[in-house]
């Protein structure tokens, strides 16, 4: 088993755990990165097509009561974070603004409220569904009851997230001391049992090994993940991990590419340190076909740092609306992909 032989196999069929590990360990040169990315792009093109999906985001809809907070989270530096949740009326306003951009689906997200989350989440989803025709999915951690998941399905929600970040229990406990890995893994299974699509997240750069990444990816394959987001650790000032080195974009891209070769028909996205339009070409090369925070989003003012003055941004009634689509759609078009037709039409065509 050697690098080029594994890639030759990968463009035709799925790869094994051992082959995935080999690719992660041996992709260390420009030549090998390009070969890996070429294989991942080929598989994406043939398995899911050349449409890049940009989701909207509305948050936060739930506070976080995880105690102690995750060491990488801004709550570790600012305990009041996640406390100022959006009302259902604000969620509805946000959904209408996002729908006007041509976006087809939106994430409503928040902190993990370990008790009492059901009603807040259901109200937010109802607000989106009553105000728009958007698909809506939920990301609030493993705090929803089975009854709430069943009601979400009846309301028309399409996906629910159970984010592990890492499958290594020791690493999980080190960076998420107030959280529960087993609860998150069981919640993922319950999401599938109810008949909803499963979203999950891995964070590169928090101490997991290549073997951990492989075990994580193949566990997601076993539970039939539908949407997998690979994020890169990005240290936040004031948190216990503020001095830890951030994940590198090429490591996130390498894990993304190997994930594509295993999870061939899943939507694969990027986040964390990769939430930068200028890193989007690297994600596209690595086989990604979806992004959450590179489209249109609505939240409290000041949550998103404005870097591009040409990007649409406005504040009103204690809400901020940011629309990155004119920039990010231009980027994916330049990489040979397209946004969904509704976004392309709303933009009226985007030149390269």
Image (cartoon, rainbow, N blue to C red):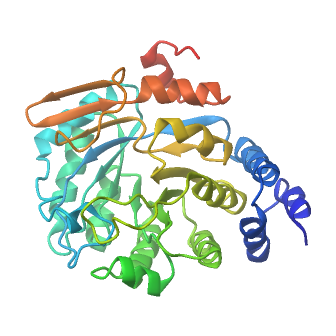
Give the percent coordinates (x, y) of residue 153: 35, 57
- Tell me the residue at 80%/54% (across/down): 32
- Tell me the residue at 22%/79% (across/down): 68
Quadrant of the image containing the C terminus: top right
Quadrant of the image containing the N terminus: bottom right
Residue farthest left in this picture: 317
Given residues 179 and 95, the one toward you in this image is 179
Residue farthest bottom in this picture: 170
Task: Tell me if residue 90 comes above or below residue 11 in the rendering.
Answer: above
* Numbered label tally: 0
Residue farthest front in this picture: 243
Specify whether 55 is left or right of 118.
Answer: right
Give the percent coordinates (x, y) of residue 66: 22, 75
Given residues 242 and 157, the one toward you in this image is 242
Give the percent coordinates (x, y) of residue 113: 19, 69
Specify whether 3 is left or right of 180.
Answer: right
Given residues 125 and 251, the one toward you in this image is 251
Specify whether 241 is left or right of 24.
Answer: left
- Tell me the residue at 16%/29% (across/down): 315
Give the percent coordinates (x, y) of residue 24: 71, 66
User: Which image quadrant is residue 171 in?
Assistant: bottom left
């Amino acid at each position: 088993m050697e690098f080029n032989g594994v890639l030759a196999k990968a463009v035709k069929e799925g790869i094994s755990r051992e082959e995935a590990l080999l690719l992660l360990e041996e992709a260390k040169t420009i030549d090998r990165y390009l070969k890996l990315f070429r294989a991942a792009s080929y598989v994406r093109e043939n398995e899911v097509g050349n449409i890049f999906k940009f989701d909207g985001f509305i948050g936060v809809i739930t506070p976080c009561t995880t105690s102690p907070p995750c060491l990488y989270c801004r709550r570790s530096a600012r305990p009041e974070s996640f406390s100022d949740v959006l009302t259902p009326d604000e969620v509805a306003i946000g959904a209408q603004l996002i729908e006007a951009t041509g976006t087809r689906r939106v994430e409503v997200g928040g902190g993990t409220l370990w008790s009492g989350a059901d009603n807040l989440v259901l109200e937010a989803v109802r607000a989106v569904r009553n105000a728009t025709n958007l698909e809506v999915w939920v990301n609030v951690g493993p705090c929803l009851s089975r009854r709430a998941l069943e009601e979400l399905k009846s309301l028309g929600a399409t996906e629910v997230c159970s984010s592990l970040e890492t499958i290594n229990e020791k690493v999980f406990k080190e960076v998420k001391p107030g959280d529960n890995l087993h609860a998150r893994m069981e919640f993922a299974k319950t999401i599938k049992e109810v008949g909803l699509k499963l979203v999950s997240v891995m964070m590169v750069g928090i101490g997991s090994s290549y073997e951990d990444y492989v075990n994580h990816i193949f566990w997601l394959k076993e539970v039939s993940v539908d949407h997998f987001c690979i994020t890169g650790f990005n240290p936040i000032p004031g948190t216990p991990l503020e001095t830890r080195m951030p994940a590198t974009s090429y490591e996130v891209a390498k894990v993304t590419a190997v994930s594509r070769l295993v999870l061939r028909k899943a939507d694969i996205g990027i986040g964390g340190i990769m939430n930068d339009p200028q890193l989007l070409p690297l994600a596209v090369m690595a086989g990604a076909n979806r992004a959450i925070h590179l489209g249109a989003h609505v939240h409290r003012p000041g949550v998103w740092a404005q870097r591009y003055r040409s990007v649409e941004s406005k504040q009103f009634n204690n809400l901020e609306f940011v629309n990155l689509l004119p920039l990010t759609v231009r980027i994916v078009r330049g990489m040979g992909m397209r946004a969904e037709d509704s976004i392309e039409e709303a933009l009226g065509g985007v030149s390269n």
